[in-house]
Image (cartoon, rainbow, N blue to C red):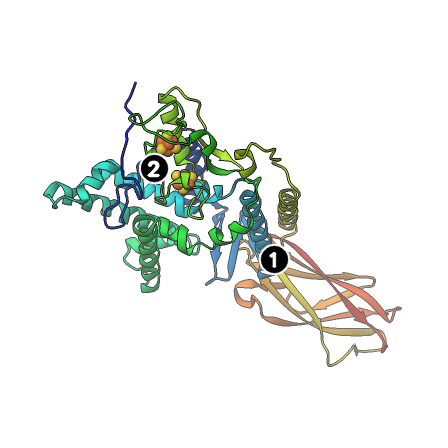
Amino acid sequence: MEKIPVVQDYTPPFARDGKFHVRLTEGRFQNLRRLTSWPMLALFFGLVWVQVDGEPWLMFSFAQRKLILFGNALSWHDLPLLAGVMIAGAFLLFFLAVAWGRVWCGFACPQSIWTWLFIRIEDFAEGKANKRARADGESLSSILLLRRVAKHLLWIGLATLTALTFTGYFMPIRDILAAATELELSAAIIGWIVIMAGLTYANAGLVREKICLHACPYSRFQGVMFDQHTRTVSYDARRGEPRANKRNADTNSGDCVDCGLCVQVCPTGIDIRDGLQAACIDCAACIDACDTVMEKLNRSKGLIRFASESQLKGQPSPFLRYRLAGYGAVMIAACSAVVYGFTDITSLLVEVRRDRNALFTQLDEHTVCNNYRIKVEGFADADESVAVSVTGEGEFQLFGPALIDLSENNSTWLPYRVCAQNMEQSRSVLTFQFRGEAGVVSKDSTFLAESI
Ligand code: SF4
Ligand code: SF4
């Protein structure tokens, strides 16, 4: 049987001047993290390159006043859709917090995902946690210096790639790279990339768990969301205590052999056996670590597991509660509203206003005209021009630009006149139609033939 590593002093693990080295572990929850984090990383680094008909699939270009979400060019008129996406996201977080605590933090939060990546790079460049901890107390040899330089260079490389990709969601990534290769990147963009890379390097490489502990607002409000039925990562004290290692174990000892492995693998440096703590991000690394120990000891797994306060007390603990159902219902409603909203997106924003100075103009005995001002704003690159026409109950004739060139007249108020012969009604509905490559928009207005 393999030896279970025992450390006597593990709070914080391998601490040297407040610094601790996280020991990597393996297990089903680490595999689950890979299942969530690798697709998310692939989406983050990949989607920025996806184009549909030469247009980015996702783009938040404030400079060009352009917003492209899942291939749909949104106008500023469609901004409530973004609010809907955020509301759905917020209620997803509430739902997860009530159901399983901080699983979002442990498995899907970018801060955690990047921190794990940086820890893996550290592990690769400088060796395992105990080796790194030992090296902390030794004088700097040339090989150690080389390893540390390699680690920081790899960190800087990943941080720069992250910053470049992130910037690519605000301006086309191909344009950034083309400008970079021709040394024409503006100082503003270089500055932005350097700041983003610096923040990534500092957050995931240096500050790490302190962000989760002190800066993340989610960790603050989730405390009020937990209840006695929330399944969080918990140590089963009834089974584990009194803890005892091989040397002092007796028949009354619990299952915890006090090996300290659960503490060594914890990315926030806490001991889960002290109970539920604000610093715990529910990453489940301690579950995997403890399960390996239990397996080696031929004891049942789950001394540390996802369990509610009631379950740990041996009391019934329903998973589905009114609050959870409520958050789930709002999340589904917000998602449905967003999906519906995407079916109703327009790439043209049109405003039609009647001339307020004159209700109508009588040209001759048979002909009456109304004046309008029209503004068309195009958001899809496919719409270079828009054809304007008019229909209604009567024979209407449109005077004004029949084709609006959006490259010249985007958002410009243009004067139009509509005339009708032998109108019988004093008031009728007139429909302006604007036809672009990306779609057709209709706007109703009123046509007056007599004073009201
Ligand atoms: S809870 Fe498990 S991993 Fe932690 S000290 Fe006890 S036996 Fe070791
Ligand atoms: S206590 Fe366990 S679940 Fe919580 S942060 Fe540490 S390793 Fe992750």
Residue 26, percent from left and from top: 36, 30
Mark 2 vs ligand 2: CB under 8 Å? yes
Q: Residues within 10 Å of mark 2 (few under 14, many from 20)?
A: many
Considering every residue shown, the one lying at the far right of the view is: 424
State the residue lying farthest toward the bottom: 357
Q: Is residue 180 left or right of residue 441?
A: left
Residue drawn 38% across and 31% down? Answer: 243
Query: Pointers 2 and 1 in contact (CB under 8 A)?
Result: no
Residue 206 or 304: which is nearer the viewer?
304
Residue sitting at x 30%, y 26%: 4
Q: Residues within 10 Å of mark 1 (few under 14, many from 20)?
A: few
Q: Which residue is mark 1?
A: 80
**Could you tell which of marks 2 and 1 lies nearer the N-terminus?**
1
**Which residue shows up at 83% across the image and 62% down it?**
393
Amino acid type at circle 1 is Pro
Residue type, numbered disc 2: Val
Q: Quadrant of ligand 2?
A: top left
Left or right? Give the position of 132 relative to 351.
left
Q: Position of residue 30 (x, y in %)?
A: 40, 33
- How many marks do you count on the picture? 2
Asked whether residue 224 is in view, the answer is yes
Residue bearing mark 2: 265
